[in-house]
Amino acid sequence: MATTRDRQLHDRQLVEQWRSIQNSYFRTAGAIDRALEAKFDIGLNEFEILDLVADSEESACRMKALGERTPMTQSAVSKVVDRLEKAGLVTRETCADDRRSLFLELTEAGRALHANAAVEHRALLKENLGS
Amino acid sequence: MATTRDRQLHDRQLVEQWRSIQNSYFRTAGAIDRALEAKFDIGLNEFEILDLVADSEESACRMKALGERTPMTQSAVSKVVDRLEKAGLVTRETCADDRRSLFLELTEAGRALHANAAVEHRALLKENLGS
DNA sequence: CGTCATTCAATGACAAGGAATATGATGCGT
DNA sequence: ACGCATCATATTCCTTGTCATTGAATGACG
């Protein structure tokens, strides 16, 4: 039977596990964010969106799809795309068959920046996630 | 020798691993945050501080120590404590031997709320982290 | 002591994210 | 064709976080 002491021990381990996840998440995200900011003048969230757009270089009306592949809110995605657009890295193209939806496309500058930033991103992931 | 294809595969796995960490972090943090907000009217960060204060129910000039045990910035901690104090859950006590530092102490209300919230917190950790 | 560098914490200006809501487009039921 | 629910996105408002700076206290050292 589970004693009170067992329960406390288990709770303590859970909390330790959680703190360790938090730390490694923040350490990694922070390192990547600072590096991208410094070298390419974009934040982590902006890169993540760029990365998703680059990844699905095919059909479909993006915005919606993006929302499903990131933990960001719909409004956060909308604002990140605003910034990317202002920075000249992506364009919003209206979608012929459903004018509510939007296509996102990388500009040449966007493609170039993504290529370089991705190298940095992967390197920092490797460094921080081990393996 | 490592081919270009090997490198691409490895990168893809790294990115997958990272997205999985992100998702589980946000899922867990989000669930806890919403639950605490709904039932106890405090956010996750506020609870984490409360938890740390409750945990080190002993000596030492807190604020500083807190900064070392959480990924939050010093100024974030300061503001979280502001809110906790306004909510009547902790008090800032000046520290006799170093008047730059501060003690934090739980009020009775703080202790009570922490006790209840901790149950919820642990339960959600267990649910989300598995085990 | 008097200075100077350092430390702890608070603050103000600003950026970013979330919730709720607005806007406009679609599509269904009648 | 009209009204209505629903969908994709944008926008507004508010909260929270960060950065840089400030203020006060301390400590080291000549």
Image (tube, coloured by chain):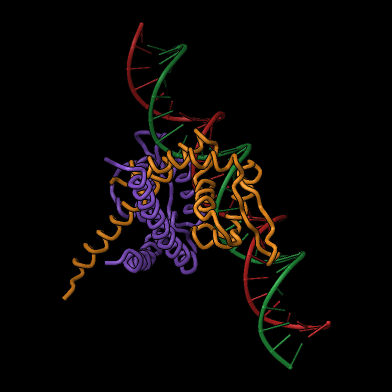
Chain colours: A purple, B orange, C red, D green
At 66% from the left and 52% from the top, the residue drawn is B92
At 54% from the left and 39% from the top, the residue drawn is B112
Q: Position of residue A71 (x, y in %)?
A: 39, 46
When the figure is inspected, residue A104 is found, relative to residue A32, above or below; the finding is: above
Residue A49 appears anywhere in the view: no
Left or right? Give the position of A79 relative to A111.
right
Snapshot quadrant of residue A123: bottom left
At 35% from the left and 45% from the top, the residue drawn is A7
Q: Please state which of residues A33 and A19 is positioned toward the viewer in this rendering.
A: A19
Snapshot quadrant of residue D15: top right
Q: Position of residue A4 (x, y in %)?
A: 36, 43
When the figure is inspected, residue B30 is found, relative to residue B105, above or below; the finding is: above
Q: Please state which of residues B53 and C17 is positioned toward the viewer in this rendering.
A: B53
Q: Which quadrant would the N terminus of chain B be assigned to in this image?
A: bottom left
Most extreme residue toward the left is B1
When the figure is inspected, residue B118 is found, relative to residue B5, above or below; the finding is: above
Q: Please state which of residues B26 and A119 is positioned toward the viewer in this rendering.
A: B26
Q: Please state which of residues B111 and D3 is positioned toward the viewer in this rendering.
A: B111
Q: Position of residue B118 (x, y in %)?
A: 46, 42
Left or right? Give the position of A93 relative to B12.
right
Left or right? Give the position of A130 relative to D19.
left
Left or right? Give the position of A57 relative to A106.
left
At 49% from the left and 53% from the top, the residue drawn is B55
When the figure is inspected, residue D24 is found, relative to residue A72, above or below; the finding is: below
Residue B46 appears anywhere in the view: yes
